[in-house]
Amino acid sequence: MTEHDRSPIATPLDRRTFLQGSALAGFAAFLAACGTDGTGGSPSAAASTEASAGASASPGELGGTVNFANWIGYIDVDDDNTTHPTLDKFTDETGVTVNYVEAVDDNETFFTRDLQGPLSQGLATQWDIFVVTDWMVARLARLGWLEKIDTANTPNFPTNLLDQYHGRSFDPDTNLAAPWQSGMTGIGFDKAQTGDLDSLEVFWDETYKGKLTYLTEMRDTVGLAAIKLGFKPEELTEDQFQQALTEVDNAVKAGLVRQLTGNSYVDVMASGDAIVAIAWSGDVSGLLVPDQTPEQDFQWALPKEGGMLWTDNMVMPKGVVNKAQAEAWINFYYEPVNAAAVEAWVNYVCPVKGAREVLVAEDPEIGDNPLIFPPDDYVARLHQFRSVTAEEEQAWSEDFSRVLGL
Amino acid sequence: MKRLRLSRASAPYFLLVPGLAWLVVFYVYPAIQMFLVSLWTGNITEGFRQTFNWSIYGESLSEYWPWILRSAEYGGLATLFAFVLGFPLAYTIAFKGGAYKNVLLFLVIAPFFTSFLLRTLSWKIILADSGIVLGPLKDAGFLPDDFRLLATPAAVVAGITYNFLPFMTLPLYVALEKIDFRLIEAARDLYAGPWRPGGAIVGGAVGGLLVAVVTAILGANPLIPGIAGAIVGGLIGTFLISEAFVRVVLPLSLPGIFAGSLLTFIPAVGDFINAELLGDPKSQMIGNVIQGRFLKVTDYPTAAALSFILMAAIIVGVLIYARLLGTEELTGGAT
């Protein structure tokens, strides 16, 4: 387990505020494939992808810089918490310097602050590549604000992209968005206080009045409420959305919910002020467990009724300045060894073919980690929030902001 | 000779140029832009168009007046608390500080050497449900187990009070420091003694009201604590407030009170950090709504309109306040 043990100081206050998923056809099948094969995979597959990696590393003298905006705590960090080994390796191989900034706090804020101004006037943004969630990719694609990835420059992408990510509704030709990580939304809890939890009912349980947090992310919080009511988030109607929203609103009005937060639920839990939270899968093992006191026992569970699934993607904005360098980075990440190195640190679900084999070869136990390799019974319970029209997006986010007290 | 005079006469106007230019570029121009944005219609995906949609002001106001009212309430309470805390502080530094004046003043502004966000975040640690403040009180049985300060209106008001306390204290200090102590001595020579009946009444009223308000926003029955507060306030008023203070010091410090309360109240009403970090969904302020409309809902027109409504509301409030306190006395007192 050494490679996913982290130094306790390597825990930023805010890992991410906004993670989401929308339509992603056949994703369950991919997770199923991940879950069933518990041992090593085929060494030959790993070997062949390594070979292709070697071939693609040939433009070693590319040079230049790439400006990369990502979420906090979303890439591997060395033990001193000072450098990112994977980025350093990329620089060594390609000569490209990475200006890596943890600039994405949540999708909407990043959109308004960094993208909307320049892109609406046809200007380049300060970023060459950045990571946002599916539904934001869909919005950017709708606006025509994304640059196509020239796949002739990226031998590894989409070649090494797991099949289930190909041809998603907002990216039919698989050349706009390169998936970075997928993850799940479920129950984060302090088992020492609550005992075992496995039901969504806990988020409406009077026992935890004032000790519960929900997420400010509409698709997570309303999505779970919809599952609780027996609706499918994939096919949510306007009426069902309103019912689910009312369910959330009632809990807030009754004072059950202490706060609706972004990623700072991690801090609220760490201080003991909340003992149950709507939580993202990688956060509990990655950010809470390393710092927990002897009296605390943080756990994450996928509710028996179901949980939410989402994917974050790397995209290039229209008019990207350092396109070749950004594409070189995508190509680099889609080498299984490199993706595996990131994966071992972040504890989310990896979209790169062959990364699983690399990880299991290094540490067979990692195959049992349900956060990285969700087993069948998880896959059966995971839902994706359906893609929404521009009008729905506006109206629903307005309705949800009422719940936030805004 | 004529030339020289001209330049002398116009010198003050030249001195205004840098400041004015700064304000025009960084305040007036964006404000006009923002005003135009408020009249847009549309949404983020289909684009916004300038339609001079004036009705948005009525709509925003009718929808969000409770938030504006709540912000005024929180901001007003925070200003009041900052005054109650800041006045004795400024008074002590000004009149009793002696050789330590500068050190004490430094301590007042010392929190500003850390980031606003960090200071407010540290409150979450201090006031945690079983943290160093509430933990021992709960263990000792003074507070029920489910009592909390964080994620309540009380925490929001307290956070604002704390963050803006120096804005209140410093103007008060400046006003008090300028008071000629011989005036107080003269008052005493003219038989200004303790202000017993007045002090008892004013102290009792203020003490009772403050404690009642605090317990009410904490969600408890304000009656008994209010009476206790009135008694304590009355005692303080009876024994500590002198006639010289009421007739000399307080009137002369009015400019400081005026400046301090405005410097505290105006930013406090628009504050959103405290409500976001220390509040719950039921204690969000108008600043949070504006921020949410800009960044989460991407409803720029409503956000812009609300900003202007807030600005107008504050200007009206300040004008009324200035009228009540008497601006002439202010300028007279300042010299």
Image (cartoon, rainbow, N blue to C red):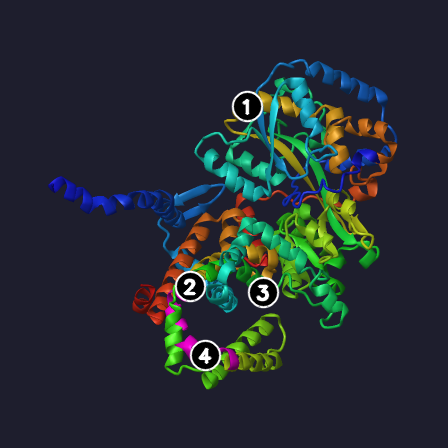
Residue B25, given in percent of the width and then of the height, sits at: 35, 42
Q: Amino acid at mark 2?
A: Glu
Q: Position of residue A377 (x, y in %)?
A: 83, 43
How crowded is the residue under tag 2: few (<14 C-alpha within 10 Å), some, or many (20+)? some
Is disc 1 placed on a helix, strand or loop?
A: loop
Q: Quadrant of residue A282?
A: top right
The residue that disc 3 covers is: B153
User: Contact, CB < 8 Å: mark 3 with mark 4?
Assistant: no
For disc 1, the neighbor class at 10 Å (few under 14, some 14 to 19, many from 20) is some
Main secondary-structure element of the magenta-colored stretch: helix
Residue placed most toward the observer, A86 or B49: A86
- Residue A322 numbered mark, or none: 1
Quarter-of-image position of residue A91:
top right
Answer with left or right where residue B308 lies relative to residue A97: left
In space, the residues marked 2 and 1 are separated at their CA atoms by 60 Å
**Can you say which quadrant of the picture contains the C terminus of chain B?**
bottom left
Residue at 59% x, 36% y is A137
- In the image, is residue B53 above or below residue A69? below
Mark 3 or 4: the one toward you: 4
Of callouts 4 and 2, the N-terminal one: 2
Give, as a single range, the part of the protein colored magenta.
Answer: B239-261
| Residue at image coords 71%, 33% | A77
Task: Give, as a three-letter code, the residue at label 1.
Answer: Asn
Residue matched to label 4? B242
Residue B177's tag is 2
